[in-house]
Amino acid sequence: MAKRPFHLSWFLSQGYGPKTWRGDWPGSASDTARWMMPDLFLDLARGLERCCFDYMIIEDSSMVPYTFQGSHDTYLRYAASTPKLDPAVLVPYLAQATRHLGLVPTLSVTEYPPFLLARLINSLDHVTEGRVGWNCVTSSNDGAAQNYGHVGQPPHDERYDVADEFADLVTKLWDAWEPDAVVIDRDAPLFADGSKVHPVFHEGKYFRCRGPLNAPRSPQGRPPICQAGGSPRGQEFAARWADTIIAEAGTVEGMKKYRENIRSLAVAAGRDPDKVKVLFLTNPLVDLSMEAAQARRQSMRADADRHLALQLSTMSRLTNIDFSQFDPDAPIPELFTNGHQSSLSKWIGKTPREVAAGTTSRMGIDFTGTTDQVAGMMQEIMEEVGGDGFLFYHTYFDRRYVMEICDGLVPALQRRGVTRARYAHRHFRDNLLEF
Ligand SMILES: Cc1cc2nc3c(=O)[nH]c(=O)nc-3n(C[C@H](O)[C@H](O)[C@H](O)COP(=O)(O)O)c2cc1C
């Protein structure tokens, strides 16, 4: 590839749950009742691998939300963020259907004990032969905290203090077996060399753990960590620990600023900034002509407005603030959240209806047009930002959308020489660091 290529990843927004059940495309119907079976996700993973995406993140949260109108009804009515199944269960199915795609389940540091999480990711890295990552989140919704025996979430910045110690312990557990600890000498006999397996004896402010992990070092050793902290404390955490950072930046200027900030925070943390890949959220929509693509975008926006409660319930879930109490056409006042601070700060001064309309194309940049038009925009924007790539999402995607992206838009990017046309490595980390 002559030009500096960029990376592609896919965000399975709203996780391992129902997708297209309200769609009007005739092909949308088949998965509605059997959404809990992996079929649609297998087709997605195969599509992403066909056009050489780096990885797929499986979003997660673990509650039936109830913030909007103090009731779970709207969430259940729209299947909004609920129901969903455990993302770690989907990973081995996706791994069986692919050979190169990175697979990144979301696991929360405020929900898992560190040993259990280190063990699960280590096991998944073994069975995927080095293709798993960890989307490290702190959780933000009080409903989730209440499912794990707490009254609410810890204060926002303290969640990242917990996460710092958590990531430190998890990586120590991953490193506890030296790479050549497993010997398998029948005659000695010596399966594993005890001098190369080290307890961690961690005693911190939040966690205690003896270690070592009860399984050998996995193919990647430390599977890549993905993070999405948007607040100043969140970005500091991400720059310290993440191999890839996913972000929602709003404008080209915002993307540039965000990436530059992350890179300088990474340097301050003693890291090589080129080893931290920042990918920006995008929801492209392609069709045979600009007019056809715009008509579809318009109908998505009209649907969002018709079902305003759905959008408002999402905003409520992310912030623990009930947005039903505000006039949808009056500017949102200064508010405080212990939830997603970076999202809320972007909404202040806009009306709830405007924010709701924005959630259908996110980012503020409208990637709508023919495959070649959208590919051209993506190329130009990445050249302007300086890297490192995009994180695609479409919450209610169907197979048609998978084909439009994987057999339409991405091949147009490949023809321009700006995204990879074949994988060079077996392991997820090596592909992520290829360029
Ligand atoms: C693209 C993207 C994906 C995210 N995925 C999840 C997720 O799966 N689960 C979760 O609890 N939070 C998720 N988050 C939320 C982040 O982990 C984080 O809480 C949020 O960006 C707010 O960060 P801040 O409090 O530092 O502003 C995601 C955020 C973004 C931008």
Image (cartoon, rainbow, N blue to C red):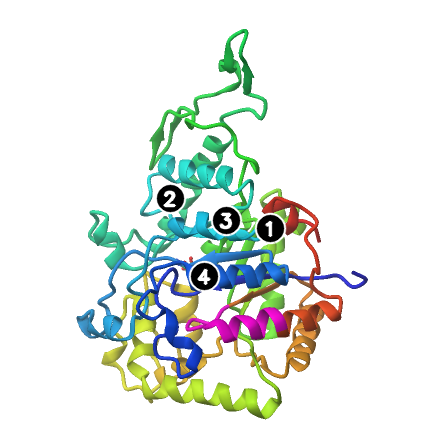
- The residue labelled by disc 4 is 41
SS for dot 4: helix
The earlier-in-sequence mark between 2 and 1 is 1
Sequence-wise, the earlier of marks 3 and 4 is 4
Mark 1 Cα-neighbour bin, 10 Å: few <14, some 14–19, many ≥20: many
Residue at point 55% right, 46% down? 131
Tell me which label, 1 or 4, sits earlier in the chain. 4
Residue type at mark 4? Phe
- Cα–Cα span, label 2 and label 1: 33 Å
Is disc 3 in contact with disc 1, using a CB cutoff of under 8 Å? no
Question: Which amino acid type is marked by label 2?
Answer: Val
Q: How many numbered marks, from 0 up?
A: 4
Residue flagged by tag 1: what amino acid is it? His
Which residue sits furthest right?
Answer: 2
Instruction: Work out how far the residue at label 2 is from the one at label 4, CA to CA, in angstroms.
Output: 32 Å
Real-space Cα separation, disc 3 to disc 4, in angstroms? 12 Å
Residues at discs 2 and 4 in contact (Cβ within 8 Å): no
State the extent of the magenta-drawn residues as a range.
393-407
Indicate the quadrant where residue 318 lies.
Answer: bottom left
Q: Residue 162 shows which numbered tag?
A: 2
Where residue 81 sits: x, y (%)?
32, 66
Residue that mark 1 sits on: 100
Q: Is residue 284 left or right of residue 308?
A: right
Residue 192 image offset from top left, x and y in percent? 50, 17
Q: For numbered disc 3, what is the local secondary structure? A: helix
Q: CA distance from mark 3 to mark 1?
A: 11 Å
Q: Amino acid at mark 3?
A: Gln
Please indicate whether residue 227 sits to the left or right of residue 369 in the image.
left
Q: CA distance from mark 2 to mark 3?
A: 34 Å
